[in-house]
Structures are given as structure tokens and as C-alpha cells.
């Protein structure tokens, strides 16, 4: 449509029009023109990734009040509104065209109805504002993994955040020419009051996996607005399911083994279960902390970090447990803090930050002082529990040298872990790919903590830690995971971990650093350099191997007593878990692969038989 380019021209300065003219892509021009028509911005800014353009975005974020300058030059703070502090699950919906069955458990809306609703909400929503057009690639450039993406937004904060978190893509769009399979994100914060979205009750996050498009309106919180993060992840899961690869909610890290070799692991953990700390283990290297694409390349599972930065939870970050992140947050590197406390002298404070709690400051509720309460009389902490920091991975001292490798890194092991006080052992290896996907990944649960509303200690089902993002029927999602590994001659080994196992006295059986040992043991297993014991749920470490590793890595004397307490097979708890998982998948019903029930029933039979011979609780020495 030649018409599209003239619609764009009308709202652009000559300079901006020259930029967009460099990309010869009719699909892109049509898309931008269509949304200029709907959103009705006063002007359009095209970001070509030049330093000047990025600086312009940062300057505008400060000028418009979406960010405030902090004491350190490259540090700013952003506040989201009081009721806009997290992902809005209720108002996040998938479009479903007529006559298509999407399966149960997903929040869906009829496509025509959804489109009518969002067109109504977005109609003229950018009147008087500037539309920003930004280009990125998900995954490394020029790689079999990369997916180009375009973001339309009226938020300089969203644009600034994405410029830190993602790989620039303007030149990639230029190179690709008339290419149509890019992801498309349209966001507007809507009407703002004191620089925060005013109409959060009109918040919408609508996902059209059939058109690779996501709409987000009347919200600013990153999880709802950063198109390339969790919005792209849902599009990625759909696309991957059609093309036989995987989009997963995982970190990637490189674990060092004997002789200085590096073995790469990818891992999924529900939030507050040790995902970031596993990605950032002392002495190891990080490729990514949140989202990965995994492909079968020449018979090997290879993976990339989709992103290039952290949008990480800041609560409890301290120099002892998180020395590398602490260093980033206290240096001259670029950081956007969100929803922490800002003090008069331009410093920040968050819940769990060592040091004295400031006497006063500004947080997401406005002026704050210790003891401030909300309308229900509950104490307001200095920072929101979901307060975050946005920073590039590229400044990390433990960044893996292959973090941007267009071919990805070869994944040797996949790790699944949840918060589990009484069932899983600290570490175990599945019998094989299908067994691992079914009994660990697809059976993942996590106990609620004091950090979430409601009762603590309740087990929440969260398959592959992807519950909130699965954009295809659940059964199909499990099936593509199974099929993916089985398409390879030697797929990655799968491991389960549990950092939260407790003893009879209610205390944790492991210290925070023990996870370093579990990863080292997995590394040896992948290379066939450690033996294991069959425990009915999979294979578990031998005492001597752990003893050696504890000594070598942590200079700790690991005792047989600790080993027995940590690795006693708890059969009643394991059987109860299998029953819970079978029930969940029976309730999902249609589309769940038969293999899932078969493998879970086999595990049940194995454990029941073991209990008959050796009792309900079996020491690893008796297995
Ligand atoms: C998560 O909640 O898993 C996050 C943050 O990584 S958000 O972008 O909100 O999804
Ligand atoms: Mn995440």
C-alpha cells in the first residue's frame, strides 16, 4: 500500500520519515500506518538505534516525569501506579477465532469481541502524544533463533527499558527488507496523572497468537508493557509449537567442570525459588536469567537468551548473597529502578537492603515514612515486593563469553525446581527425557510464600514455571516438550532440584550455597563422571561424590548424617504428589498425551513396590 507510506509521512518530521524510508518493508509500513490511524498520535518518532535516538528517549523519559534522576548519573527511578505493580492476569487474554478450540485453563476472548474492545479502548488513545516506533531482535542477530520485533508505544520508560533489555533491530529490519513474520507490540499507558496510568480499570493485555500481535493499554508495569518480554514469550510459545522448537521460561548458565570445561544448563523455577541465584552462582557464568529459545541444531539442543538484560526483583538483594548484582546497582552502569523508595539525596532503598531504613522518601504510594499504612491499615513497606531493577547483562563480570553466539550454546542439562518443604530430594536425575519432562517439568509445583497474598505453604501447580505464559492448550504444550527431546539422539539430561526441603524440626536441610554442589554433580553426570543410585524417582548422588564436591568447592565436611537426612526417599509424600498431578491433568482432559499418565502410573507402581519391600521412608544407603 503506497498509501501507508504517505500516512506515515504526514505525522513524521523529515528526519523521522527518512529513517523509516530506509526500511523497505510494506508489511511494516502497513502495520505502522494502520495504528497511526487508530491511536491518532500527534507525531511519530522512529528510533534507528543511534546514540542520539536512545539519548532522546532517555531525555524525554525524564522530561515527561516517567523517570526521575537519581544521584548516580546513569541511574533513574520509575514508579508504576499503586494498582499497577504486577502482571494483570485477569485482564490478559488470548484471542480465539471462531470455530477454534483453545483448550481449558487459558484466559481467552472471542477474537472479534476482543478486537472490538481493544479498538474502542485504543481509539485516539495517543491524541496529543508522540508515538515511538522501536525495532529489536529477540535472540542474537543473524541467527537461526532470531525473531525481529517492532514495538509501538507512547511511553518513554517502556522504550528506554527495552533499549537496555533487548538487542537493537533497526539494521536487521533494513537487512530483511519486505519480511512479514516479525512480532508486533502496541502499547499505550493511556491517560496519565502524575506520570502514571490513570485508567487502570480499563487495563487490557490482549494477545493475538494468530497475527503475532499483542495489545497493551492503560498500564505501565513492565510485565504488562514490555512487548519483548512476557508478551513476546507467549507469541514465542505458539510459534515454537508450530515449528518444533521451544520457548521456555528459563535461565542459562555455564557450569565449570574438570579441566576447565563449561557445560551449559537451562533451568525453570517459579518465582522466589532460586532461579536468579542459580543463574548467578559464584565461579560460574551467565548467559541469561529469564527467557530462552531452544532449537534442535544438528541433533543437539542449542539455546539462546532471548534478552540482553535483567528486569529483576530487587527485594533482599544484598552484597553477601548477590555480590555481582550489588556491584551493578552501585556503580555508574545504567540502571532503571522501579517501585523502590527514593530519598531526598537521590539514593534508593528497598526491602531487605542492608543499612538503616530511611526516615522518609517517595515510593509508589507517594510520600513515605516508616509506619505508613494503606486504607486497610496494613503497613506499607519502603518498596513494593515486586519492585525491580532494569540493567544490561553486558556489564556483568560473570557474563559468559558465548552469551551472544548466533548458534546458541549446547545445553547439557535442564533443571526444574520449586519450593517444596517435604517431597523432592535436593537433587535427582530423571531416567530420560520423557520421564524428566513428565515427572519434573510437567509436575512442577511451588509452595506459596509470605511474599504473595493468601495462605502460605499452599502448593501451586506451575508446569515448567510457564503457567502464566502458556499460549496453546496445556496438553499440547507438554506434548511438544516431549517430542522436542525425542527428536534428538542424545537430548539434554533432565534434573529436579529442591532447595527448600525441611527436616522434622521444620528447619531447612540445606544451606543456600549447597546448590553449587548440586550443579557440579549434574555436570559430572552429563559427562559420565559420577555414579548414581536408583531411587525409584530417578538417580541420586552417591555420598562419596558429594563429600568430595563439598570439600573441593565449599571446603565443607559433608557428613553421612546430612546425606541421609537430605536424600531419604519420602514415599508417601511422593505418591501424594503424583496423585495431585494426575488429577490436574485428568481435569484438563482433552489433548493431554497418554504418555503422561503412563509414566506417572509407572512411577507410582515403582514407589509402591519399594515401600512394600523397604518401608515408607528409605535411607539412600538402603536403596
Ligand atoms: C516474572 O514474573 O517471571 C518476571 C517478571 O520475570 S514479569 O516481566 O512481570 O513477567
Ligand atoms: Mn520471568
Image (tube, rainbow, N blue to C red):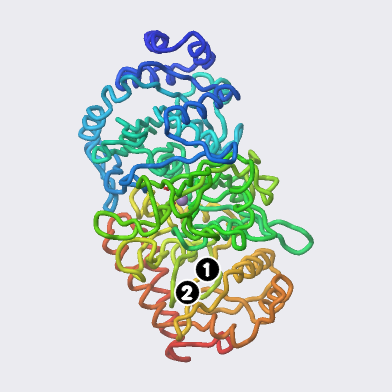
Of the image marks 1 and 2, the number of the one nearer the N terminus: 2
Question: In the image, 107: left or right of 253?
Answer: left
The residue depicted at 53 percent of the width and 52 percent of the height is 487
| Mark 2 burial class by Cα count in 10 Å: few <14, some 14-19, many 20+ | many
- Cβ atoms under marks 1 and 2 closer than 8 Å: yes
Residue on which the image places disc 2: 424
Task: Say which of 418 and 581 sits in front.
Answer: 418
Task: Say which of 573 and 168 sits in front.
Answer: 168
The residue depicted at 55 percent of the width and 28 percent of the height is 169
Q: Quadrant of residue 392?
A: top right
- Res. 479 visible in picture: no
- Res. 212 visible in picture: yes
Question: Residue lying furthest right in this view?
Answer: 259
Q: Quadrant of residue 227?
A: top left
Q: Residue 282 has which mark?
A: none
Q: Tell me how far mark 1 sits from mark 2, CA to CA.
A: 7 Å
- For label 1, the SS is strand
**Ligand 1 is within 8 Å of the C-beta of the residue at disc 2:** no
Residue 282, position as x, y percentages in the image: 66, 60
Residue 464, position as x, y percentages in the image: 44, 57
Q: Quadrant of the N terminus?
A: top left
Residue on which the image places disc 1: 497
- For label 2, the SS is loop
| Mark 1 burial class by Cα count in 10 Å: few <14, some 14-19, many 20+ | many
Residue 395, position as x, y percentages in the image: 65, 43
The residue depicted at 52 percent of the width and 39 percent of the height is 76
Q: Where is 222 relative to 526, above or below?
A: above
Q: Where is 397 relative to 193, above or below?
A: below
The residue depicted at 42 percent of the width and 61 percent of the height is 442
Residue 570, position as x, y percentages in the image: 45, 82
Q: Where is 90 relative to 357, above or below?
A: above
> Number of callouts in the render?
2
Amino acid at each position: 500500500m503506497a498509501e501507508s507510506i504517505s500516512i506515515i509521512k504526514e505525522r513524521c518530521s523529515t528526519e523521522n520519515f527518512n529513517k523509516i524510508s530506509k526500511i523497505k518493508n510494506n508489511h511494516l509500513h502497513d502495520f505502522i500506518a494502520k495504528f497511526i490511524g487508530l491511536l491518532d498520535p500527534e507525531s511519530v518518532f522512529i528510533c534507528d538505534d543511534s546514540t542520539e535516538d536512545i539519548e532522546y528517549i532517555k531525555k524525554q523519559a525524564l522530561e515527561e516525569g516517567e523517570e526521575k534522576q537519581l544521584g548516580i548519573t546513569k541511574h533513574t527511578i520509575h514508579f508504576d501506579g499503586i494498582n499497577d505493580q504486577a502482571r494483570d492476569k485477569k485482564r490478559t487474554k488470548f484471542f480465539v477465532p471462531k470455530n477454534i478450540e483453545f483448550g481449558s485453563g487459558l484466559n481467552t476472548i472471542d477474537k472479534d469481541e476482543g478486537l472490538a474492545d481493544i479498538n474502542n479502548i485504543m481509539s485516539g488513545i495517543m491524541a496529543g502524544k508522540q508515538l515511538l516506533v522501536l525495532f529489536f531482535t529477540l535472540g542474537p542477530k543473524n541467527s537461526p533463533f532470531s525473531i525481529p520485533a517492532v514495538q509501538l508505544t507512547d511511553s518513554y520508560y517502556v522504550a528506554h527499558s527495552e533499549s537496555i533489555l533487548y538487542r537493537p533491530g533497526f539494521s536487521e529490519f533494513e537487512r530483511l527488507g519486505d519480511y512479514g513474520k516479525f512480532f508486533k507490540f502496541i502499547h499505550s499507558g493511556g491517560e496519565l496523572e502524575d506520570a502514571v496510568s490513570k485508567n487502570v480499570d480499563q487495563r487490557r493485555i490482549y494477545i493475538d497468537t494468530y497475527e503475532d500481535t499483542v495489545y497493551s493499554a492503560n498500564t505501565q508495569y513492565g510485565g504488562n508493557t514490555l512487548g519483548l518480554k512476557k508478551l513476546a514469550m507467549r507469541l514465542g510459545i505458539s510459534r515454537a509449537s508450530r515449528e518444533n522448537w521451544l520457548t521456555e521460561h528459563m535461565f542459562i548458565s555455564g557450569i565449570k567442570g574438570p579441566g576447565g570445561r563449561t557445560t551449559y544448563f537451562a533451568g525453570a523455577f517459579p518465582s522466589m525459588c532460586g532461579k536468579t541465584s542459580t543463574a548467578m552462582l559464584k565461579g560460574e557464568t551467565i548467559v541469561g536469567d529469564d527467557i530462552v529459545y531452544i532449537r534442535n541444531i544438528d541433533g543437539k539442543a542449542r539455546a539462546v537468551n532471548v534478552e540482553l538484560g535483567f528486569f529483576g526483583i530487587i527485594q533482599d538483594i544484598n552484597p553477601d548473597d548477590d555480590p555481582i548484582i550489588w556491584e551493578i546497582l552501585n556503580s555508574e552502569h545504567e540502571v532503571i529502578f522501579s517501585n523502590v523508595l527514593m530519598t531526598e539525596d537521590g539514593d534508593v532503598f528497598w526491602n531487605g537492603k542492608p543499612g538503616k531504613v530511611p526516615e522518609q522518601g517517595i515510593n509508589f504510594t507517594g510520600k513515605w515514612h516508616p509506619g505508613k499504612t494503606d486504607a486497610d491499615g496494613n503497613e506499607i513497606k519502603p518498596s513494593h515486593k515486586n519492585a525491580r531493577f532494569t540493567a544490561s547483562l553486558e556489564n556483568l563480570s560473570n557474563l559468559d563469553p558465548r552469551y551472544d553466539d548466533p548458534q546458541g550454546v549446547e545445553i547439557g542439562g535442564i533443571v526444574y525446581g520449586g519450593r517444596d518443604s517435604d517431597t523432592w530430594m535436593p537433587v535427582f536425575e530423571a531416567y530420560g527425557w520423557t520421564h524428566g519432562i513428565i515427572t519434573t517439568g510437567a509436575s512442577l509445583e511451588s509452595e506459596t510464600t509470605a511474599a504473595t497474598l493468601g495462605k502460605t505453604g499452599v502448593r501451586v501447580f506451575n508446569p515448567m514455571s510457564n503457567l502464566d505464559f502458556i499460549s496453546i492448550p496445556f496438553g499440547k504444550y507438554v506434548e511438544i516438550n516431549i517430542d522436542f527431546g525425542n527428536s534428538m539422539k542424545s537430548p539434554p539430561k533432565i534434573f529436579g532440584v529442591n532447595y527448600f526441603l525441611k527436616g522434622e524440626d521444620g528447619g531447612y536441610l540445606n544451606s543456600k550455597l549447597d546448590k553449587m554442589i548440586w550443579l557440579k554433580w549434574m555436570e559430572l553426570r552429563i559427562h559420565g563422571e559420577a555414579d548414581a543410585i536408583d531411587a525409584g524417582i530417578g538417580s541420586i548422588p552417591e555420598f562419596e561424590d558429594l563429600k568430595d564436591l563439598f570439600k573441593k568447592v565449599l571446603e565443607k565436611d559433608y557428613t553421612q548424617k546430612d546425606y541421609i537426612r537430605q536424600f531419604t526417599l519420602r514415599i508417601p509424600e511422593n505418591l501424594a504428589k503424583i496423585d495431585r498431578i494426575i488429577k490436574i491433568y485428568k481435569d484438563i482432559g482433552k489433548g493431554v498425551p497418554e504418555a503422561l499418565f503412563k509414566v506417572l502410573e509407572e512411577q507410582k507402581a515403582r514407589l509402591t513396590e519399594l515401600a512394600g519391600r523397604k518401608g515408607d521412608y528409605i535411607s539412600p544407603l538402603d536403596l
